[in-house]
């Protein structure tokens, strides 16, 4: 199969008062069309940095990203992002949030009625038909994340980037969302990169698990192909030998080979101050 | 009160009990406060003697409300009578001499208390709106661009603490020099007061808008970048709605200051309005003066309160963030 996305030897350095801080060193990865790839690693290892570079939100210091033969230089809807904390505009309803994206992407090609239908179709995919006209503060954390996914899907991206999409949800809701995502995936067969720190989630959803070493100068440690048959059934897999082996492999990588050093290092990545105005009670 | 079946041990909320408690909270307590204040006021007023008689108590103020209103009615009747006389005279003159070009003169009677209230309200609203038109776009620009903010911030910080009253002489001179016209649409004094109001509204509004815009969540900005929203759409769809709560905070702050400053400016510059009314009464020095001034003070307070409530209602109507509009 032809790779749709080519991440070729990217380095990422962040300037700090005490000189540049190398977050990523020589990260290379090729992703095929329709493939579901998870990035897993300890927190602070630069998973999000990789995703942000693919999204175009960051520029790699060296190396580059090529999507469908075109180099990525800025963000765009063909690389839709599902953000960790949903990032819905709090003043718009679920429908209007998706509408903003659809109008921007398909405003010229689709008629009003077609756009409405397309928005409703995407909200239906994530089972949000019943609460389409509610605003983010009126729905639960899981529902917000569903709308966030619907918004990304509605852009009809060539690759879908998910930054710990279920990280802020409780375990039951998360399981439910994973099942939903598998169901959608079986229908749309999108190319997906998902960041996660949940081993079960990675094994359950992925075709390949990309395991990252600890930073600074983090890079790809190992890549684990997951050849479990689809559709995958959470309960059946729990006692499946192959599933258990894969799970053990990831755990071994994370807790033996890449054991997080005991001393807690302060994160050196320069971060803009955040104002969590949109933080919700449900999360 | 024994008819109210409300006890502490009831866990099921009793409808009548809740109603009674809410009435007490929203109506009875404020009323009690007002009554206590009125009593203290009238007792204290009795004890203060000035060269213009006793300090006005609530009763004197109440009487003045009536007096000022009837003065207004009488003045209006006089004006109506004047215009009627003028009309008949013009008609008679035209009957005698068909070539006569009629001259219409406006009534030049004294401005009543109600006229002054109206003038002040119009002035404060026009000055405020002018400030909104300038400050909100400027605040958005400085909020969006760090460069512009760094360039402009020292200027804003320097002018912010200046009392607008200090500007008043300069504004008066500049308006007299630049606003020259044969038939002015509005009075010079109005322009002067309005610009003074604008000058004091400008700074808090620019600062609050700019802070609100700069504090927009990075994630929302990233959404805009991923969607590749054009600059104008970005402002319209993301920046403006996200910073509306802060913009309104600035607007309420400004309007409150503006109302205070306007009264002072009118007193100082003898421009028509409530401030002039207060000053004229003071200069007048009749036995009624103090109670009329006290009446004006009460009215100024009530109008200031209503202006703030009005802004709050507007914010509730416009803003998506109902929580920020609850105080």
Image (cartoon, coloured by chain):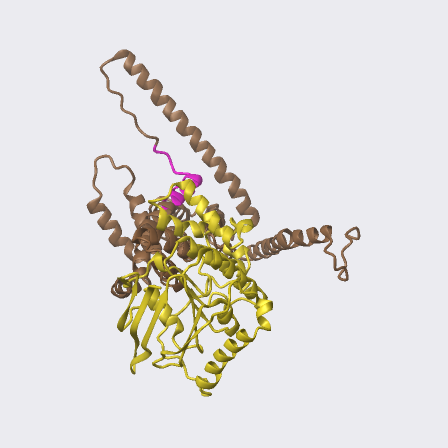
Chain colours: A yellow, B brown
Percent coordinates x, y for residue A176 in the rendering:
56, 62
**In the visual, does B301 lie left or right of B234?**
right
Q: Is residue A226 above or below residue B254?
A: below
**In the visual, does B31 lie left or right of B325?**
right
- The count of marks equals 0
**In the visual, does A124 lie left or right of B260?**
right
Regarding residue A31, the answer to whether it shows in the image is yes
- Residue beneath the point at 50% across and 58% down: A146
Q: Which residue reaches farthest right?
A: B2
- Residue beneath the point at 29% across and 63% down: A72
Quarter residue B200 falls in: bottom left
Depth check: give the residue in front, A189 or A75: A189
Percent coordinates x, y for residue B26 in the rendering:
62, 52
- Dominant secondary structure of the magenta stretch? helix
Q: Is residue B110 shown in magenta? A: yes
Percent coordinates x, y for residue A140 in the rendering:
55, 59
Q: Is residue B13 above or below residue A258?
A: above
Give the residues drawn in magenta, as a range.
Answer: B108-123
Depth check: give the residue in front, A109 or A112: A109
Q: Is residue A148 above or below residue B68?
A: below
Depth check: give the residue in front, A141 or B96: A141
């Amino acid at each position: 199969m032809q790779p749709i996305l080519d991440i070729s030897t990217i380095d990422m350095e962040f300037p700090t008062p005490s000189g540049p801080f190398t977050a990523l060193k020589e990260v290379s990865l090729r992703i095929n069309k329709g493939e579901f790839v998870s990035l897993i690693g300890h927190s602070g290892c630069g998973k999000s940095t990789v995703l942000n570079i693919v999204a175009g939100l960051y520029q790699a210091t060296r190396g580059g990203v090529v999507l469908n033969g075109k180099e990525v230089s800025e963000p765009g809807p063909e690389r839709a992002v599902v953000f960790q904390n949903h990032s819905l505009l709090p003043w718009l309803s679920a429908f209007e949030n998706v509408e903003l994206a659809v109008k921007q992407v398909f405003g010229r090609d689709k008629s009003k009625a077609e756009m409405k239908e397309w928005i409703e179709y995407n909200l239906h995919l994530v089972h949000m038909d019943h609460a389409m006209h509610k605003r983010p503060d009126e729905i639960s954390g899981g529902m917000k994340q569903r709308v966030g996914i619907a918004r990304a899907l509605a852009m009809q991206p060539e690759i879908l980037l998910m930054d710990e999409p279920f990280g802020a949800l409780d375990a039951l809701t998360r399981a439910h969302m994973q099942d939903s995502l598998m169901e959608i995936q079986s229908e749309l067969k999108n190319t997906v990169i998902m960041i996660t720190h949940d081993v079960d989630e990675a094994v359950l959803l992925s075709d390949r698990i990309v395991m990252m070493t600890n930073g600074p100068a983090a890079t790809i440690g190992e890549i684990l192909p997951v050849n479990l048959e689809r559709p995958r059934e959470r309960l059946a897999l729990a006692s499946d030998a192959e599933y258990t082996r894969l799970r053990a492999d990831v755990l071994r990588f994370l807790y033996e080979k890449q054991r997080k050093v005991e001393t807690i290092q302060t994160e050196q990545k320069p971060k803009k101050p955040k104002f969590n105005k949109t933080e919700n009670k449900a999360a | 009160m024994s008819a109210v079946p409300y006890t502490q041990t009831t866990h099921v909320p009793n409808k009548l009990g809740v109603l009674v408690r809410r009435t007490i909270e929203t109506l009875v307590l404020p009323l009690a406060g007002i009554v206590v204040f009125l009593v203290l006021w009238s007792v204290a007023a009795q004890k203060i003697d000035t060269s213009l008689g006793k300090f006005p108590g609530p009763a004197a103020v109440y009487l003045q409300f009536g007096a000022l209103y009837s003065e207004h009615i009488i003045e209006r009747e006089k004006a109506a009578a004047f215009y009627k006389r003028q009309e008949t005279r013009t008609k008679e003159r035209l009957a005698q001499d068909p070539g006569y070009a009629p001259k219409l003169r406006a009534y030049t009677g004294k401005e009543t208390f109600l006229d002054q209230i109206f003038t002040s309200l119009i002035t404060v609203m026009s000055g405020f709106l002018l400030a909104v038109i300038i400050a909100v776009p400027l605040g958005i620009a400085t909020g969006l661009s760090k460069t512009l903010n760094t360039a402009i911030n020292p200027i804003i910080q320097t002018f912010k603490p200046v009392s607008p009253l200090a500007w008043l002489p300069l504004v008066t001179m500049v308006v007299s020099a630049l606003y020259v016209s044969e038939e002015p649409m509005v009075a010079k004094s109005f322009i002067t007061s309005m610009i003074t109001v604008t000058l004091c509204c400008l700074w808090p509004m620019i600062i609050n808008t700019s802070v609100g815009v700069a504090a927009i969540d990075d994630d929302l900005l990233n959404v805009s970048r991923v969607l590749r929203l054009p600059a104008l759409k970005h402002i319209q769809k993301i920046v403006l709605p996200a910073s509306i709560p802060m913009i309104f905070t600035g607007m309420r702050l400004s309007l409150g200051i503006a109302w205070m400053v306007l009264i002072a400016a009118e007193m100082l510059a003898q421009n028509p309005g409530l401030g002039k009314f207060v000053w004229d009464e003071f200069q007048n020095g009749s036995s009624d003066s103090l109670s009329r001034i006290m009446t004006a003070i009460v009215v100024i307070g009530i109008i200031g309160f209503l202006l703030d409530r009005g802004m709050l209602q507007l914010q509730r109507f416009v803003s998506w963030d109902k929580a920020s509009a609850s105080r």
